[in-house]
Image: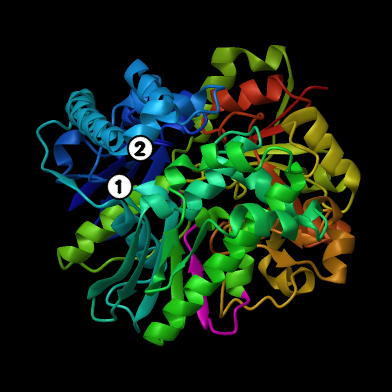
Amino acid sequence: MKILAIHVGHNSTVAAMEDGEIKGALSQEKLDNKKNSADFPVDAIRSLCRELGWRADEIDKVLIASLEVFPAICYDYLFGSTPETQTSLSIAELIKRAEKGIAGRLAPKAFDRLRTIRANQLKEMGVEELQVNLKKAGLEQKSIEHIEHHTCHARAAFHSFCSTPSKKDALIFTLDGSGDGLCATVSIARADGGWERLAETPMRSSLGGIYSNTTRFLGMKILEHEYKVMGLAPYAKSYYLKTYEKIFKPVIDLDPHNPLSFSSNVDTTKFYDYLVENAVGERFDNIAAALQHLTEDLCIRWIKSGIEKTGLRDIFVGGGVFMNVKLNQRIKDLEEVDTVCFMPSCGDESNPIGACYDYAARSGHPTKPLKDLFLGIGYSREDFVDYIEKTRLSEKYKIQEFDEIEVKIAQLLASKNVVARFHGRCEWGARSLGNRAILAHPSYMESFYTVNDLIKSRDFWMPFAPSILEEHASLYLQNYNPEKSEAPYMICTYQATEEGVAQLRAAIHQGDHTLRPQVVKKQVNPDYYRLIHEFHGLTGVGAVLNTSFNLHGYPLVATPEQAIMTFENSGLQYLALGTFLISKS
């Protein structure tokens, strides 16, 4: 049975399943080159089906990874410079301005009713727009089913790692900004396939909403730059706790009547306004650290409450808040946790995967966990030859082909060169895992500055990450225990060992010496493993610096055209396009 699942909205994405196995997943941003693209993923659907050899008439079921669907205009604010949360619709702007004035104080319930009316209108527009877009994709005649947002998050988190039926019961936490009216859930996945939701939190008490609106308040992009706030937090001094006590602690806590849910004293959908009224004048680094402290403290107590209530110590987490790798480190290190699995790239782009798993599980079909995240589109040697000839690249650059391109890349890296690598199918999600990557020697800070200044243009406090050979993980990572939590997806930080600090200096956080590793197994990505193995033979270092192959503000590249555009508009000197090495000199 062939199933296609679609996430509509921020970072729109499509996933494909056949006989209980995820065969592919691709975000629209990888095709239109707009980071976090909210356009309906027509291009992604067509490209993924072409990659898999699927025809539209072969698809048995289409799933929409949400109960509510909104029109594209609702996501305009994500791509503009305004810090406001409303859409570009003039009626929404007028309502928001009026609510802040005398009318809002005199008749607050009237504005609640207006918002409800407007939300219902937008949902109707969303349904109409969805039908038009499904027709564009040739899917209008298919059987369509909507799957609830947090069910998708939970199913993705669990089934991506576990076959069903599974070996034992597990506890699943989801946490994000909002989706279908909720921001958090706690569920149990039974070994026999049963599924029970224990608790849920409405979106007005959203810890994720607090984090995103604080990101906006600090002058950064919502749903994109939260990682910058997290990366800034370790640089603050201890007096950030005063900011925490004053600004954040009074706002939200666990519900005293049910500690598996959250309760907020402030409607978190309006948290930006709360910050304007209460946080102006606070140091920006203190705000970042106070917010991170709130997130870690509250989530750790929430997870402990779930374990205490259920007695289950094997946990799975999903939803955008768990993109916070420092939070995940705290969870991983909990004594109460026996095992933990973090859904990689666990924002809404994971929900089509969860929708597929949910439908399969409810239909009584066994499901298979993800083998890897190389779920996108790939290119053959013939494709590269055609592209090089068509674009006449050899007239502009030196091009050589190597039977053992991994050996050549390792030699260049060992000589302190920076190399972009384009190989195989592209990664699904937010992380570079070697197939669309910029690689460098991790032992020298010159690598950090070269990549940052000439290519990435990232904020100075943001670290890069290492790809580490499996057999060297314990050498570089403190308390690495793959039986408790594996680390293949750069979704959790570790403290670096002394050896890690020495050998991976350019790939760790300079403020606290943590690192966000990708532990590379030979059986998962043999070509990338061999590259790092060759590098180790030349240098004695069992890891390379890895950052995503893209320009600042653009998504991870997916096509040869995007790769060359990035190569030509950066200080990159070398690009390995399949077995071809392209160099500027």
Residue 327 seen in the figure: yes
From the image, tell me which residue sits under label 1. 16
Residue 34 seen in the figure: no
Residue at 30% in and 49% down: 181
User: Label 1 near label 2: C-beta < 8 Å?
Assistant: yes
Along the horizontal axis of the image, is 409 left or right of 484?
Answer: right
Along the horizontal axis of the image, is 224 left or right of 173?
Answer: right
Residue range in magenta is 333-347
Q: Which amino acid does label 2 sit on?
A: Leu
Q: Note whether 268 is above or below 224 in the view shown.
A: below
- Percent position of residue 472, x then y: 74, 70
- Percent position of residue 25, x then y: 39, 45
Q: The C terminus is located in which quarter?
A: top right
From the image, tell me which residue sits under label 2. 48
Q: Note whether 383 is above or below 489 in the view shown.
A: above
**Pick the front one: 396 or 120:** 120
- Percent position of residue 154, x then y: 35, 62
